[in-house]
Amino acid sequence: MSNTSNTDVHMYFLGLALDEARKCKPTPTAFCVGCVLTASLTDSSEPVILARGYSRELPGNTHAEANALTKARRLSKEELRELLPSTPEDVTIEHVLNRADVYTTMEPCSVRTSGLAPCADALIAAGIRRCFIGVGEPDDFVQCEGTRKLEDAGIEVVWTRGLEQECLAVARTGHRSNT
Ligand SMILES: [Zn+2]
């Protein structure tokens, strides 16, 4: 159960994810999604941002959550220790990802037609701790089962309340139905 200040922190990071989503180059065939990856190595320490990502940021038809994971894995050992000074010298990003929280403006995808791994699978493989979601994926393109997949894998899914309309509007930027 989260208290008010925790809720504020979650809203803050989801707001940053929304800022990422606004950086997307719109396309009529996909959503504009933003993602922020945070971690705190103990339950009492302040979370730090490991990486941010948005749809199509990295080359190819890439997704926000996968891009944030890729960027986190590109951090050097020095950068990682700078972000998390109290970590042991031999800390690896995979260890940190096991304590990571994901903030995404839209439910992680469960199906990719492009052949890339769906974001839900990538987050499960990374072993993240919790996933905070701005809005569910509407069935504009496919039926999304990302949340069910995450929960089945033991990842805590939190529906963040209050930014649903904004997350959806930004996601549908450039779509016919959004004019
Ligand atoms: Zn995805």
Image (cartoon, helix red, strand yellow):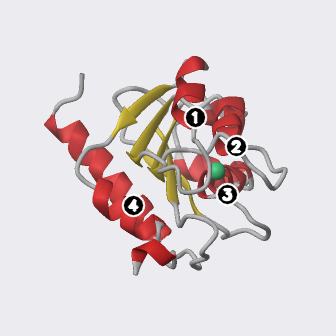
The residue at the point 61 percent across, 45 percent down is 109
Residue depicted at x 67% and y 51% = 66
Q: What residue is pinned by disc 3?
A: 67
Q: Amino acid at mark 4?
A: Leu
- Image quadrant assignment for residue 4: top left
CA gap, disc 2 and disc 4: 19 Å
Q: Residues within 10 Å of mark 1 (few under 14, many from 20)?
A: some
* Residue found 64% across the figure and 28% down from its top: 127
Q: Is residue 20 left or right of residue 116?
A: left
Q: Give the structural element (helix, strand or loop) at label 2.
A: loop
Q: CA distance from mark 3 to mark 4?
A: 20 Å
Residue depth check, mark 1 versus mark 3: number of the one nearer the observer: 1
Residue at 60%, 55% in the rendered image? 141
Locate residue 163: give its quadrant: bottom left
If you read the primary sequence from the N terminus, does the residue marked by circle 4 or circle 1 appear first?
Answer: 1
- Residue that numbered label 1 is attached to: 145
How packed mark 3 is, by other alpha carbons closer than 10 Å (few <14, some 14-19, many 20 or more), is many
- Residue at disc 3, CB closer than 8 Å to ligand 1: no
Circle 4 residue: 168
- Classify mark 4: residues with Cα within 10 Å, few (<14), some (14-19) or many (20+): many
Q: Amino acid at mark 2?
A: Val
- Pick the residue in front: 57 or 168: 168
Q: Which residue is mark 2?
A: 111
Is ligand 1 less than 8 Å from the beta carbon at label 4? Answer: no
- What's the residue type where badge 3 is placed? Asn
- Tell which circle, 2 or 1, labels the residue nearer the N-terminal end: 2
The total of numbered circles placed on residues is: 4
The reply to whether the C-beta atoms of the residues labelled 4 and 1 are less than 8 Å apart is no
